Image (cartoon, grey):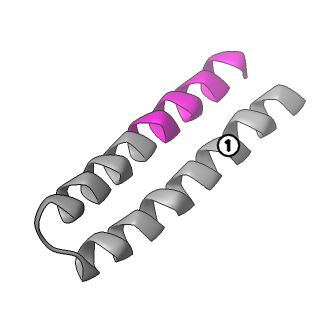
Amino acid sequence: MARETDWNAAAARLESDAARYDREAARSTGLWRRIVEDQADDHRAWAAHYRAKAKRQH
């Protein structure tokens, strides 16, 4: 159970970071915007992976 909480906490941090990157992308243009959007997508993908890992260990 403690391990599941750790994975969920890590996923929550990644989702929070993704939201921060989304806000940055909204203020950005061009190549930098694409880079920040990709970073947000990567963070969301890792968050989903960590949530699934927590469910498997439950």
Rendered location of residue 54, percent (x, y): 66, 28
Task: Name the residue: 82% across, 27% down.
Answer: 3
Rendered location of residue 41, percent (x, y): 32, 46
Determine if residue 12 is in view.
yes
56, 30: nearer the viewer: 30
Rendered location of residue 24, percent (x, y): 35, 74
In the displayed structure, 43 sits above or below 16; it is: above
Three-letter amino acid code of the residue under disc 1: Ala
In the displayed structure, 56 sits above or below 28; it is: above
Left or right: 25 as drawn, with respect to 9? left
Instruction: Say whether residue 50 is magenta.
Output: yes
First to last magenta residue range? 45-58
2, 11: nearer the viewer: 11
The furthest residue to the bottom: 27
Q: How many marks?
A: 1
In the displayed structure, 15 sits above or below 20; it is: above
What residue is shown with label 1?
A: 10
Task: Name the residue: 60% across, 44% down.
Answer: 11
Left or right: 20 as drawn, with respect to 9? left
Left or right: 18 as drawn, with respect to 41? right
Instruction: Say whether residue 56 is magenta.
Output: yes
Task: Name the residue: 70% across, 34% down.
Answer: 7
Which quarter of the image is occupied by the C terminus? top right
The furthest residue to the front: 31
Determine if residue 1 is in view.
no
Which quarter of the image is occupied by the N terminus? top right
Q: Dividing the picture into quarters, in which one does residue 57 lie? A: top right
29, 3: nearer the viewer: 29
Which secondary structure type mostly characterizes the magenta part of the structure?
helix
Dot 1: what SS?
A: helix
The furthest residue to the top: 56
Q: Dividing the picture into quarters, in which one does residue 8 lie? A: top right
